[in-house]
Amino acid sequence: MIEFKMPALGADMDEGTLDEWLVKPGDKVTRGQIVAVVETTKAAVEIECWQEGTVSELIVPVGETVQVGTVLATLAASGEPAEEQPRRRSRPARPAKKPASAPSGPRATRTPPAVPQHRRWVSPAARRLAQSLGVNVDTISGTGPQGSVIISDVEQAADSKTTLTKPRTKPAASDRAAQMRKSIAAAMGRSKREIPHYYLVDEIILDAALSWLIARNAQRSIDERVLPAALLLKAVGVAAQRFGEFNGFWRDDGFQPASGVHVGVGISLRGGGLVAPAIHDVPEKKLGELMDDLSDLVARARSFSLRSSEMSDPTITVTNLGDQGVEAVFGIIYPPQVALVGFGRPTQQVRAIDGGIRIVSAVQATLAADHRASDGHRGALFLSAINELLQEPDLLEK
Amino acid sequence: MTDTKLAHELLSDMVRVRRMEEKCAELYSAAKIRGFLHLYVGEEAVAAGSLRALADDDAVVATYREHAHALLRGIPMTSIMAEMFGKQEGCSRGRGGSMHLFDASRRFYGGNAIVAGGLPLAVGIALADAMLQQKRVTACYFGDGAVAEGAFHESLNMAVLWNLPVLFCCENNLYAMGTALDRAQSQTDLTAKAASYRVPTMAVDGMDVEACHTAAQQGVDHVRDTGGPFFIEFRTYRFRAHSMFDPELYRDKAEVEQWRERDPIQLFTEQCLLDRRLSEADVRDIETSAAAEIDAAVAFAEAGTWEDAADLERDVLTPASAR
Amino acid sequence: MKTSYRTAVHDALRDAFRDDPRVVLMGEDVGRYGGTYAASKGLLAEFGPERVRDTPLSELGFVGIGIGAALNGLRPIVEVMTVNFSLLALDQIVNTAAALRHMSGGQFSVPLVVRMATGAGRQLAAQHSHSLEPWYAHIPGIKVVAPATVEDAYGMLGPALADPDPVVIFEHVQLYNTSADVEALTPTDISRAAVRRSGTDVTLVAYGGSLGKALDAANELSLAGIDCEVIDLRVLRPLDDDTILESVRKTHRAVVIDEAWRTGSFAAEIMARVMEGAFYDLDAPVARVCSAEVPIPYAKHLEQAALPQTEAIVTAVQGLFGEQP
Amino acid sequence: MTHEDTRSAVMSVLTTIAPEIEPDDIADDALLRDQVDLDSMDWLNFLRGIHKRLHVDIPEADYASLRTLADVVGYVEKSASTPD
């Protein structure tokens, strides 16, 4: 039996509220399939399941807030028999997000024991009241006729909820901002308490990169144009692949290198707050692909619809505050990661180059790194590698 | 009234009815008139002769074969035709149709499509007249079929019991829809049935308009004089089917033809021409003016308007404003 | 002063006669006999045989005569002995009285009042005991009222007579002997339902002979901590939805009590309207207590078993509550 | 398409990118970046939106000339009047 747990989508996530189940008992789940939506303080996040099997039981009902690590559902691995129970047929199956691979005829007569024979009995008035009070009727016990949930049950639940738990409805915008503030505070506080940061700065001359980009973009329609941000991202990703001690996690008093390079991108949200979801496998992606991913990610982050893997997977983070006009940014590492690369605003500088004086476009690249996992020397080499990559931008194209 | 003038009016009444009914049959085939349509062709002498005997403030209760009665009580042919078209200019605002022509101002209490349904109503109207000391007559028309209904017996009984001013006009056309009188009644002499309630009765040739008129006049006089009821059986015949959708399986064509030889219009026309009460020109004039009246009625009905369906639920109960 | 329902009906008739010379009473044994339920006792002597008319046993005939008389200036009150007998007059009520105004395009109205006894409880068996008033409530063009109290037994007749349209009044046989302390009998209305007892937990909807049972059940339930609101429908047509829905929106529960049979019943109509108008306010399914689906039997214990009883109402109400009231 | 139509289409794209702004608060001749919080990604998405909605492809070289709302609207109108 496989246990599907509430994932930790970031160091600042202690709990999540199950917003929606996208599978039901009896559904086959493939690796990477999105099976649920979880409301976090940052966003409603689509949760993928990384194991294959057949859903046996949905343990946590919609609306319930549970700690990270709580078993949300159980799955029977392929070959493992699910417990026998006549499958109820009266309710039409919820349409699957993806076309079901199962045959369209009568489904296997297998279902987990915990599923009730009928939809939860909730009186119409109780259901309406619950909705307005933000109470999840599935989690409260009914005292009405035949165990139905009635108005007084909802009122009682609402009373205890206001003293014990947070509202379970989707937080309103201001609510969300406050929640996010709190979680950023927790994560960054922990980072500064636990992580011995060191900082390095290097100036990267962008003339080659920018002129290459201008030439590249000039031949393309607006939908194919690439921003310098994507180029910087790619350079960091490729460099991080070479300097593994900056790509991974500090856990249990030791460094765990990550297998892929998933670069977290700091995205500031309109109305305040910040998320840093991952773009997966950056070194393997073509520049155009990366740009598309970046564009998509920003849009989804700002509309609060990220996927769990994007939230939990970053192995290193890039923050780009250049647009805001600052020259350099000294970031705080997002635990349990061990490094953060920052870029400021490209500026025109007078520099002596090859014995002559030239006006160049330059950007301040910074590295904040965890001294437990790496030393300044390696950090300097890492930053230099980024610099060098940006001098030969055509190598970053593919 | 001179003989000539009366003859002219009697013939004119019958012709107007006959031509209107024929036009209705045509318009029914053209789908301008729908629902059930019961025509009076052949029976014109009864309505023409009897209604003439009534005073203006007397009341009439009729059946679903009541176009003639409505017309001859003075409801304009235009509003009768508009009613059959279902237009709101109709005498029942298009809510009634062919079987439910009404006119409160003429004390015309309608076409009642429940066989014998009008009899208790007529007795009640007469009761009110009697109690309110109105010396008015209520003429109640019904067919031979109604005689089989309990309402007939209950009504006659109470009208006599309470001595109420009702003129019962039985239009015996020998068929209750398709059931011949002798297949429905143990006693086919309907005056005998009525007489058992001790109501004075009379039977008259319903194909003879003058006889119908005379009989009705006698009946009305009796009712008005005594304040009690009177019963007349008009022995008549309908030439056309019961309603438009009736293949007439129940009677011989020969029987119909035999009765047609006693067509009341033809009989009366011949009689009047013979005794010179009317000239050929008079007869032509009557036809011409009936045709013109019908043309105008059809045009009026065609030009009529449909009531807004949003007003569907009006006239179910009396609106507060009308109380 | 204690006044009986019977007296209230009688006084209402007497006062109507005194107030309006157009009023006549017609029916079987309304005169010399004094009315089957003695409601018209003494009226013949006071107002004479013209206005208090004993009729032959001709329900169809005299109801139709009542309609004709109403059309032509009188204000007739027609008494039909029981609702079972009124089936003989159903044609005149449905096909003429109710339809005349409409099919004449609004030219005629029928200011007729038909009174009849309804309901069971007196061991009158299957041809004198039924509650067919819902049949009448089905018909557009008439008003249907069911006075359940002494006040209404008196008070509804005046407005019914004043109404330009046909009004059918149903007097439950078990009510004639009931009485109440009433200071003065005055006209009431024939348009609204009445809240006879206010409460917060459940709405009991009843009319006519069932009102008392509903109130008894409410009293009993109050001992168990369930606070019932009791609505007396009073008018079955046109139905006063607002009073019912307003109450259900407050209590979130409803039980309908109707002595008519359950299938195709008036109770079903009330339930449907509650669903339509207050579904999201309901905290439990709407329940009903109706008569068993048998022609009413003669034997007392069987008759009682067939009818809605207070205990059944109590049980139905309790069924709407789970572990806690 | 009238000037007003163009302006409102451009504004509609802008409010999609930056839903927090009040269209009435945007002055035509003030620097757009002073009035709206737009980073380079937002700016690109803004221009992509214009491309999609109004079929005007603005080359990167022209970005610098688009500083105010009036600039953008004017640019769109000019491009629309000259066939591709």
Image: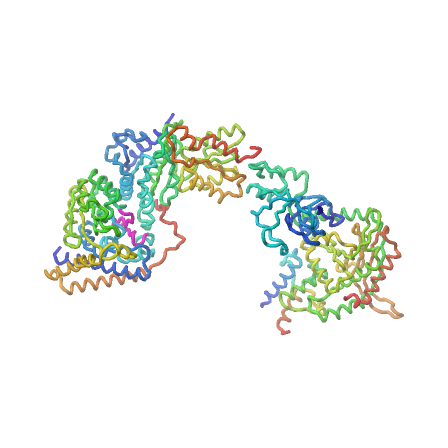
Residue C320 in the image: above or below residue A224: above
Residue A277 drawn at (x, y percent): 73, 54
Quarter of the rendering occupied by the N terminus of chain B: bottom left
Q: Relative to B75, is A316 on the left or the right? A: right
Direction left: furthest residue: B275
Identify which residue, A225 or B247, lies in the foreground. B247
Identify which residue, D52 or C236, lies in the foreground. C236
Residue B221 in the image: above or below residue B20: above
Magenta-colored span = B96-115
Direction bottom: furthest residue: D83
Q: Which residue is found at the position 81% from the left and 59% from the top?
A: A241
Q: Which residue is found at the position 63% from the left and 69% from the top?
A: D77
Q: Relative to A202, is D37 on the left or the right? A: left
Q: Is residue B104 magenta?
A: yes
Residue A317 drawn at (x, y percent): 78, 55
* Residue A378, visible in the rendered structure: yes
Identify which residue, A249 or B75, lies in the foreground. A249
